[in-house]
Amino acid sequence: MFDIGFTEIFVIAVIALLVLGPERLPRAARFAGLWVRRARAQWYSVKTEFERELADEELKRSLLDARDDLREAGRSLNEGGAALRREIETMDPDRAAADPAPSEPAGDPPAPTDTPPSDDPAPRA
């Protein structure tokens, strides 16, 4: 993290022993360890939050790209369908005029009968 090697740590420990003395050095080391642990925990929290936000942005970007690709594919299919209809109309203009639009049903639905259904069960074979 700070790129400190063994020799630097040893020099810092010797200086701390000379300055603080053998009685206060363990308490100072625990205090320093506590603050290092808190700093690492805070750094880890910030790092994970940043990574989570970055992942959300990447996911949103990929979803928008996929949506744009699907829209482009839909446009391409619509253009291809229109070109195919025009080609069919040029090949057989009489049939194109006689056929209903593709969105209309091919025939009328069957007319309802006026006879009510009977209460007798159907005969079994």
Image (cartoon, rainbow, N blue to C red):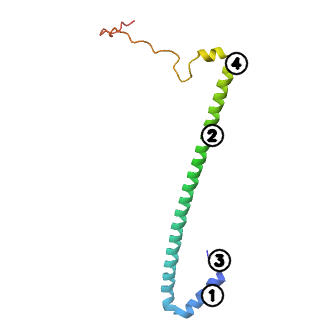
Q: Earlier in the sequence, mark 4 or mark 1?
A: 1
Report, in whole angstroms, how far the alpha carbon at label 4 lies from the one at label 3.
Answer: 78 Å
Question: In terms of secondary structure, where does tag 3 sit?
Answer: loop
- 115 relative position to 103: left or right: left
The disc label shown at residue 91, or none:
4
Closer mark to the observer between disc 4 and disc 3: 4
* 122 lies above or below 21: above
Q: Looking at the picture, which amino acid does disc 3 mark? A: Asp
Question: In terms of secondary structure, where does tag 1 sit?
Answer: helix
Contact between labelled residues 1 and 2, with CB atoms less than 8 Å apart: no
Residue under label 1: 11
Residue 24 image point, x, y percent? 49, 90
**Is disc 1 surrounded by few (<14), some (14 to 19) or many (20+) residues within 10 Å?**
few
Q: Looking at the picture, which amino acid does disc 1 mark? A: Val
Residue under label 3: 3
* 119 lies above or below 101: above
Q: Looking at the picture, which amino acid does disc 2 mark? A: Glu
